Amino acid sequence: MPSYGQVLDTAERWRELPGLQRVPAGVALTFDDGPDPGCTPGVLDALDAAEVRATFFVLGEQLMRNHALAREAAQRGHELGLHGFEHADHDTLRPQAARDDIARALGSFEAATGHRPRFFRPPYGRFSQASYDACLHLGLEPVYWSQWGEDWEPIPAERVVDLASRDLADGDIVLLHDSTRYAHRPNCAATAEAVAGIVAKARELGLSVGPLGALAPA
Ligand SMILES: [Zn+2]
C-alpha cells in the first residue's frame, strides 16, 4: 500500500485507495476549492440558469472566510462535500498532519453549515494511506472523478466544455473548480460559462445532471 513519500500514478493509487469514480446513472457536476466570493456566485447563477444542482467540495480555510456563501449554495439546493482544510497534497504531509487536516476541515464544515458532509475528495485526487484511513474513520465517503475540464488552466469556456464533455457518458463525475486560489488562471469566468455547454451535452445524450448525493444512493 502507498505510504508517506511514495509516489504512485493516479490509476494505481485509485485502485489501492478506492473511492467513487462514477455514479450509477446520470452525470454528477462537482466544483472544488471554494467557496470563493470571486467565483462561486457566478457558478451558482450559471447552475440556476441551467436549472441543475451540483456538489461543491469546499475547503476549511475558504469556509472560515466565506461561510455565508457555502450556506447560500446549500440554500439554493446544492450539496456540500469536503475537500480538506488547506489545499494540501496529502503525500507531502506527515501522517498525523494529514489526519489533522481532515479533522480540522470537518470541524469547520460542521461549524459553518450545521451538518456533516457525506463525501470527501482529497486535493489533487491524492490520498495518503493515513488520510484515507482518517476519511473512512470519520464516516466520509472518498470521491474522485471520471471527467474534468482542466479549468485550473487559463483556457476559454469552449475548451473547458470540450474537455469535460467530449467523451461524456452515463455515470460520469465531472470535476470543475469554483476558485482561482489554487490555480494559475486570473478568474473563473470560463468555468461559469462552461456550465451551460456541459449540461447541454448531457441532455443531448438523454442524461440527467445532478449532485453526487442524488445520483449515488447511500
Ligand atoms: Zn482542489
Image (cartoon, rainbow, N blue to C red):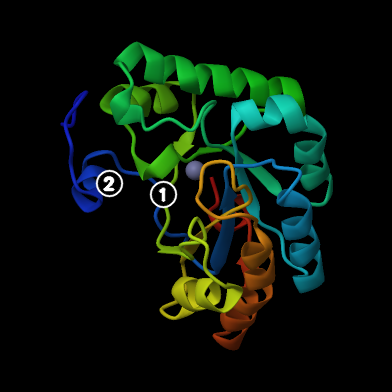
Query: Can you give x and y, in whole percent of width and height, for residue 147 in the image?
Result: 43, 65
Quick one: label 2 or label 1, which is nearer the N terminus?
2
| Image position of 156 with respect to 95: above or below | below
What residue is at 45 percent from the left and 73 percent from the top?
163
Label placed on residue 69? none
Residue under label 1, please give it: 144
| Mark 1 secondary-structure assignment | loop
What residue is at 62 percent from the left and 63 percent from the top?
191
Query: Can you give x and y, in whole percent of width and height, for residue 197 in the image?
Result: 63, 79
Would residue 48 be found to the left or right of residue 159 on screen? right
Type of amino acid at the residue the image marks with label 2: Trp
Q: Using a 10 Å C-alpha cutoff, classify the residue at mark 1 as few (fewer than 14 neighbours), some (14 to 19) or many (20 or more).
A: many
Residue found farthest to the bottom: 204
Quadrant occupied by the N terminus: top left
| Mark 2 secondary-structure assignment | helix
Identify which residue, 84 or 53, lies in the foreground. Answer: 84
Type of amino acid at the residue the image marks with label 1: Tyr
Label placed on residue 14? 2
Q: Quadrant of residue 61?
A: top right
Identify which residue, 15 or 195, lies in the foreground. Answer: 195
